[in-house]
Image (spheres, grey):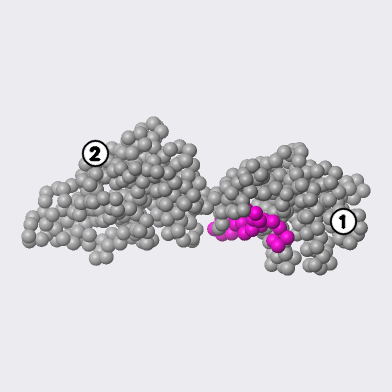
Amino acid sequence: MTAPDDERLLTGVSGFDEILHGGLLPRRAYLIRGGPGSGKTTLGLHFLLSGPREDSLFVTLGESERQLRENAARCGLPMDGVDVLDLSPGQDEESSGAYSLLESWDVEGNTVHDGILEHVREHKPRRILIDSLSQMRYLSVDTFQFRKKVLSLLRKLIAEESTVAFTSEQASVEDDEALPFLSDGVINLENSEIGRQCRITKLRGSSFAEGAHYFSLGEEGMTLYPRLMPEQHGRSVEHEPLGSGIDEFDALTHGGIERGTVTLLSGPTGVGKTTLGAQLACAAAARNERSAIYSFDEGASTFFTRCEQVGLPAQSLVDSGNLVFEAVEPLHYNPDRFAAVVRKEIEERGTSLVMIDSLSGYQHSVHGEDLQLRVHALCRYLVNMGITVVLVNEVYSIAGAQTKVTEYGLSYIADNIIMLRYMELDGELRKSIGVLKKRAGSFERSLREFEITSEGLRIGLPLRGMRGILSGTPELTTSSPRDPT
């Protein structure tokens, strides 16, 4: 059963409360696990600072208070007004009232356990962060005593109406493995070769977003990018055909591609996929429908120069606010972060068409994960939101007997598939265009010649009287002459 939102405690981390389905439940204990540098303390600081600072307590068992405050300020989370109980090693007990970690749990009245409880009972904090509880393990003679003392501490802190977050270095030792069983929630942070990821494995009394979610650490602390769940988003849309601005293309598609569908532009390098996609985006922008182009393959300068050379007014449409172009460096992004960028564009700025150029570039941001799964989730979300999607996909073969639509097995995602291919004709390298698939309506079955000129894209008449066009080496048939183009 999930608690009402008004009973939740916000963590202060962008995106994190979303995967918690509203925040943390109060008066419970939460374990934050991870290796060195994974972001445990940063997440705990966000939790403390998101509430009234006078009601927050930081119990430090590792860093000194001075180091702690300096480091927190450097990462954009100054702890002004937050109470700190410094129980780190090396403190002068007589002057500071701190307790040495060398003391045993069994020394009555002078233990870390009792020191924390005494401070909490006196100051009544509502949010407590203990960093790191792993240090307490060294004060216990065995695993049984460690578990007993930790359970006692957590229960007594909760009885004081406090919500407790405590960190632990993730290790395979028996003591650390016991901590999840003593907690109401377990948050795992990992810093690996594919990036920083957060995974919630336990949250008593509440549902949560399962799976791994990417996050980043920066000058303002932690930012989490929730994994995209398409089924949680949707709105109604009328699947009306959208004109491309090219009469011949609209003839090929019997009126144009439909709103709220996915169109795959498939073809080898240099054949004109990006230019055709830009034409579709510019046509939507010219109708005062905001369009967004995310390019993983080229920068803004190259893109706008290309558009200018073929007569596409991309720059003026950007200036009007109806078109946005963003060059995406895939090595600096991950799938969850990119999805967050797209969601913001859709949900806050009213964008109606999204173009991704290209799938091979996007693949680098996936870092070895399942590309099909990521593209499927992103496209399903966009379609559920009524967005028209244009995917640019490069096939590696220039010509040949076997014609591939995509190298990634993603043709099932597409509602429309537009094929662009090279062909050798009259000793020249020419291009052809055709529609392979259109779920929402009929389309022209013929292939047409495709050209990119200084005056824009030109699509010729159907290529009649020829065969073998898709192989790249068409032949004239004896039955009928080729139509002029």
Residue in the image at 42% along x and 59% along y: 372
- x and y, in percent, of residue 398 in the image: 28, 59
Image position of 170 (left or right of 296): right
Please say whether residue 196 is visible from this viewpoint: no
> Label 2 neighbourhood size at 10 Å, few (<14), some (14-19), many (20+)?
few
In this figure, which residue is indicated by the disc labeled 1? 111
Give the residue furthest to the top.
Answer: 320
Query: Nearer the N terminus, badge 2 or badge 1?
Result: 1
Res 186 visible: yes
Judged from the image, the secondary structure of the residue bearing numbered disc 2 is loop
Magenta stretch contains residue 426 = no
Residue 193: name its quadrant: bottom right
Q: Nearer the viewer, residue 283 or 471?
A: 283
Q: Amino acid at mark 1?
A: Thr
Residue occupying image coordinates x 37% and y 43%: 237
Residue 252 rendering spot, x and y as whole percentages: 22, 48
Q: Is residue 107 found left or right of 54 in the rendered image? A: right
Give yes or no for residue 193 being in the magenta stretch.
Answer: yes
Tell me which residue sits at (52%, 49%) in the image: 337
Question: For residue 189, which numbered disc appears in the image?
Answer: none
